[in-house]
Amino acid sequence: MKTQLLPLLLLATTITLLASKSTTTADITAGMADFPQATPAPPDYPFSRAVRAGDFVYISGQIGATPDGKLAGDFDTQARQTMDNIVAALHEQNLTTADIVKCTVMIDDMAKWPTFNTIYRSYFPGGKFPARSAFGADGLAMGAALEVDCIAYAPLKK
């Protein structure tokens, strides 16, 4: 059932973009670019840390890996490191957590959900939170306790 939803979501997104009078495919692809990374992904990982598509910046899923590529210690430390990695990816693009409009959280142990929420709140001063989805996941990259990806709104200068 879940596999069948992805094509429907992609179709709905395409229809929405095509129906919009203010956004064209050229508008979206003109701003599409991989961003240079101050802290590159390990060389064997086939992804960009951040990619711009039009007015949006997509931050790849971040885990609690430290700059040396090793996972931070316990859940709390990994959660903070994950959020710090998101902040660093945003900072490389001159953005902050205030620019985030959507996050997806994948967490290995849903019993840790309240702990993560406490840590997550501290990264959004003033209680302005982006939209968010979350789900339990088993088998995250490198054995991570959680992974978070985000979308930031960053209008292109015209």
Image (tube, helix red, strand yellow):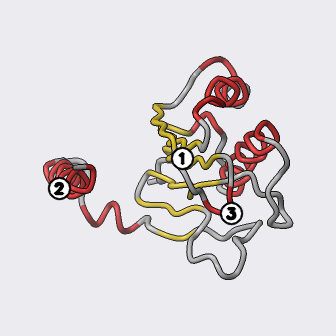
Find residue 150 and name its label. 1
Mark 1 crowd level (few <14, some 14–19, many ≥20, 10 Å Cα): many
Q: Amino acid at mark 1?
A: Cys
Report helix, strand or loop for mark 3: helix
Horizontal arrangement in the rendering, residue 32 relative to residue 111 (left or right): left
Find residue 118 and name its label. none
Label 1 with label 3: CB-CB less than 8 Å: no
Can you identify the residue that label 2 sits on?
Answer: 11
Q: Closer to the N terminus: mark 1 or mark 2?
A: 2
- When the figure is inspected, residue 91 is found, relative to residue 47, above or below; the finding is above
Q: Amino acid at mark 3?
A: Met
Query: In whole angstroms, how far apart are the C-alphas of marks 3 and 2?
Result: 32 Å
At a point 62% along the width and 62% down the height, the residue shown is 141
Judging depth in this view, the residue of 134 and 33 nearest the camera is 134
Find residue 142 and name its label. 3
Horizontal arrangement in the rendering, residue 76 relative to residue 53 (left or right): right
Mark 2 crowd level (few <14, some 14–19, many ≥20, 10 Å Cα): few
Q: Amino acid at mark 2?
A: Leu
Report helix, strand or loop for mark 2: helix
Q: Position of residue 80 (x, y in %)?
A: 77, 40
At a point 58% along the width and 61% down the height, the residue shown is 50
Q: Position of residue 109 (x, y in %)?
A: 61, 38
